[in-house]
Image (tube, rainbow, N blue to C red):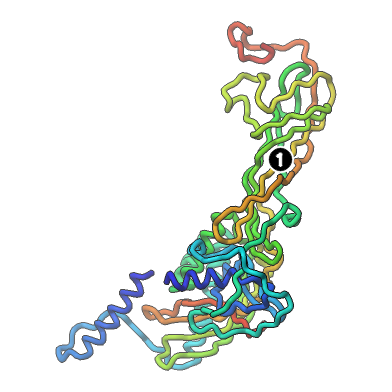
């Protein structure tokens, strides 16, 4: 069984450019639906989806091998019942740059704020962004990969010409255990009335898994921007409160 | 899985051992009603595969599929199905829409009528892969119709899908 597993894993790493056929690969109905089946067409082998076999970690690979010529015509090889071909070409994964990942786009972050939709001149308005780690399967340079985007920084455009850079998307006052209109790592104090169009740009660190389970980091960051969030900043002159600031120091306006 | 195979092997050995006995012991409850004809076997295989795809579609529609798609599977087909489900779960992906058996062509039948092979054209063009947000993330290179080579085995009086492979030299 172990042998089968590693052979299958090795077969999945055969570079598609060699024109080698991957025959008899298991493909269930659900796998086909998920786009996880490897199949051949008249002119190319398409090895799609991620490595389905956990044992892929043990498959030997080499970075120093020379990739075979693109236009070599290799006729389908009978690889026996074990599908164990002798002399298959194994190519190490290439070093990728962000431009290679141009077709992979992390989803736009979501943006909100406290109090919802408005702020008060001279008092902190809490801005909240949410972005999560994303894994996107696809093909890069003929390799079947999964690209992972991890949010590393949140840059809030406060809409009044200032920006706030934070390592997290922020948290609500309630979850921080803080009172309303208190400063947070993502809050902003508006100095003037008006409606400010706030947006957030999330910087994602990208890494790529070639099916081996190892994440190879790609230098640089990929940015994704949220849609605008309008904050109507008002001036507050009076407020009807339940208790005085002495009784409730965390109350509004205290 | 392994225990099922082992059980099957052991019961087969037991039947063989019992066949040599002179005192007729009560036979092992392993009914193996061989199909009366080739047509009957092929029809049963087709019914099994269609029932499996129906169960899969029900599952992907969010319904409680009974029997579950995995109930129709055994061996590598079952393993592949479980790995696929796990992979999708880990990637926070799910399948929606239906797969359609566009054609079913039985290709071979073993002499004891317990193993059947068929080529199925499975149309998945109405099926999409969605992510946790419900966005369509169906791989663009996914074929919409693909020929699959399906192997069936008879187990416990019923047919089960034992293998499902890409049928490279078949077109749909």
Q: Residue at x 43, y 81 (%)?
A: B153
SS class of the residue under badge 1? strand
The answer to whether residue B131 is seen in the rendering is: no
How far across and down, in percent of the image, does residue A16 sit? 66, 72
Q: Which residue is mark 1?
A: A202
Q: Is residue A155 above or below residue A104?
A: above
How far across and down, in percent of the image, does residue A189 sit? 75, 21
How far across and down, in percent of the image, does residue A149 sit? 65, 48
Report whether A244 appears left or right of A81: right
The answer to whether residue A235 is seen in the rendering is: yes
Q: Residues within 10 Å of mark 1 (few under 14, many from 20)?
A: many
Report whether B73 appears left or right of A236: left
Q: Residue at x 56, y 64 (%)?
A: A51
Q: Quadrant of residue B13?
A: bottom left
Report whether B34 appears left or right of B90: left
Quadrant that contains the N terminus of chain A: bottom left
Quadrant that contains the C terminus of chain A: top right
How far across and down, in percent of the image, does residue A197 sit? 81, 32
Q: Residue at x 68, y 63 (%)?
A: A139
Q: Nearer the viewer, residue B89 or A106?
A: A106
Q: Residue at x 21, y 86 (%)?
A: B18
Mark 1 belongs to chain: A
Q: Quadrant of residue A196?
A: top right
Q: Quadrant of residue A252?
A: top right
């Amino acid at each position: 069984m172990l042998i089968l597993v590693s052979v299958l894993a090795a077969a999945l790493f055969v570079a598609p450019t060699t024109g080698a056929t991957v025959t008899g690969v298991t493909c269930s109905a659900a796998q086909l639906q998920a786009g996880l089946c490897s199949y051949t067409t008249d002119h190319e082998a398409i090895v799609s989806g991620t490595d389905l076999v956990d044992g892929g970690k043990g498959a030997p690979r080499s970075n120093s091998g020379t990739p075979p010529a693109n236009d070599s015509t290799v006729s389908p090889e009978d690889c026996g019942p074990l599908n164990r071909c002798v002399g298959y070409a194994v190519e190490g994964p290439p070093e990728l740059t962000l431009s290679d990942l141009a077709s992979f786009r992390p989803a736009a972050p979501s943006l909100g704020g406290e109090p919802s939709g408005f702020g008060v001149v001279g008092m902190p308005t809490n801005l909240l962004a949410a972005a999560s780690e994303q894994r996107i399967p696809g093909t890069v340079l003929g390799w079947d990969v999964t690209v992972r985007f991890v949010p590393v920084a949140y840059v809030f455009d406060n809409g009044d010409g200032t920006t706030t850079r934070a390592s997290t998307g922020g948290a609500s006052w309630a979850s921080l255990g803080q009172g309303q209109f208190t400063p947070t790592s993502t809050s902003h104090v508006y100095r003037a009335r008006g409606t400010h169009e706030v947006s957030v740009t999330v910087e994602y660190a990208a890494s790529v898994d070639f099916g081996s389970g190892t994440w190879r980091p790609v230098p640089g960051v990929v940015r994704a921007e949220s849609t605008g969030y309008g904050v109507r900043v008002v001036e507050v002159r009076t407020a009807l409160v339940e208790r005085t600031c002495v009784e409730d120091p965390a109350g509004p306006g205290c | 899985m392994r225990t099922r195979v082992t059980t099957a092997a052991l019961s087969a050995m037991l039947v063989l051992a019992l066949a040599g006995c002179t005192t007729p012991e009560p036979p092992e409850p392993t009914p193996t009603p061989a199909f009366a004809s080739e047509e009957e076997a092929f029809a049963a295989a087709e019914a099994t595969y269609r029932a499996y795809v129906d169960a899969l579609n029900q599952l992907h529609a969010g319904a409680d599929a009974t029997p579950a798609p995995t109930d129709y599977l055994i061996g590598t087909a079952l393993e592949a199905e479980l790995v696929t489900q796990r992979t999708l779960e880990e990637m926070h992906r799910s399948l929606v829409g239906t797969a359609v058996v566009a054609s079913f062509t039985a290709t071979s039948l073993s002499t004891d009528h317990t193993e059947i092979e068929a080529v199925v054209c499975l149309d998945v063009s109405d099926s999409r892969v969605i992510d946790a947000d419900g966005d369509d993330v169906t791989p663009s290179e996914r074929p919409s119709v693909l020929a699959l080579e399906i192997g069936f085995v008879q187990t416990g009086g019923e047919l089960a899908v034992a293998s499902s492979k890409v049928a490279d030299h078949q077109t749909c």
